[in-house]
Image: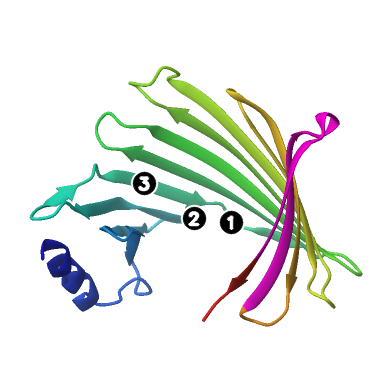
């Protein structure tokens, strides 16, 4: 009953996510939880936002409120020219009073080649957990996507690593069939020389 009441409030709330400067994005982490990402766009020369993420979980007769997460983003002005576009973004978040603090710097470069569209994404994250065994952690990811404009076939090579795990690499092939249907095949491996790899295939359909 309590969860149904909160769900009614979410459904009755106006869709203000597209109205500046307010940000309102209802979320549903799982079937027993509801949340909302609430914030505002800041009046700065760069595209900057700040806000909080709230969520509640149905625990039968009462609701359980999860720790609030504060967040902020800053997007640098994109640089375009000669078929290339570069974007840089900074993300900050803090979960609760004593939760994990995270800072992520990401950069993307898009280039239009004669027969391919290329996109390179790089990100570096720093996590600080005051109560964890490893208070400071580093994570890095990088991916390269090559797409054929004619067939819309994409090949994605990605790699990631943290200070507590070895390099992880993956190669993915994606093929859209229609606007709502896409097939993909993926090969994952931590150490290609040891031949310890995983192969999988999937499809996605949007109604």
Residue topped by disc 3: 71
- In the image, taking residue 91 as reference, residue 202 lies left or right, namely right
In which image quadrant can residue 152 be found?
Answer: bottom right
Foreground residue among 83 and 148: 148
The disc at residue 146 is none
* Residue at the (34%, 74%) spot, across then down: 19
- In the image, taking residue 40 as reference, residue 125 lies left or right, namely right
Residue lying at the far top of the rendered structure: 133
The answer to the question of whether label 1 and label 2 lie on touching residues, with beta carbons closer than 8 A, is: yes
Q: CA distance from mark 3 to mark 1?
A: 20 Å
In which image quadrant can residue 17 be found?
Answer: bottom left
Sequence-wise, which precedes: disc 1 or disc 2? 2
Residue topped by disc 2: 46
* Residue at the (31%, 52%) spot, across then down: 51
Residue topped by disc 1: 77
Q: CA distance from mark 3 to mark 2?
A: 16 Å
Mark 1 residue element: loop
């Amino acid at each position: 009953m309590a969860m149904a009441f909160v769900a009614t409030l979410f459904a009755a709330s106006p869709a203000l996510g597209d109205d500046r400067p307010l940000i309102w994005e209802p979320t549903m982490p799982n079937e027993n939880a509801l949340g909302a990402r609430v914030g505002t766009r800041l009046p700065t020369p760069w595209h900057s936002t700040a806000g909080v993420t709230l969520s509640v979980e149905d625990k039968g007769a009462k609701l359980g409120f999860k720790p609030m997460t504060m967040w902020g983003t800053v997007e640098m002005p994109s640089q375009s020219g000669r078929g290339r576009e570069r974007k840089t973004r900074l993300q900050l978040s803090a979960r609760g009073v004593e939760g994990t603090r995270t800072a992520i710097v990401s950069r993307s470069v898009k280039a239009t080649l004669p027969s391919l569209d290329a996109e390179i994404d790089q990100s570096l994250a720093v996590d600080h957990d005051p109560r964890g065994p490893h208070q400071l952690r580093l994570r890095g990811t990088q991916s390269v996507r090559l797409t054929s404009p004619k067939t819309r076939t994409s090949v994605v090579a990605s790699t990631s690593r943290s200070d507590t795990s070895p390099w992880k690499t993956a190669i993915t092939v994606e093929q859209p069939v229609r606007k709502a249907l896409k097939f993909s095949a993926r090969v994952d491996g931590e150490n290609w020389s040891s031949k310890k790899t995983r192969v999988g295939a999937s499809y996605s359909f949007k109604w």
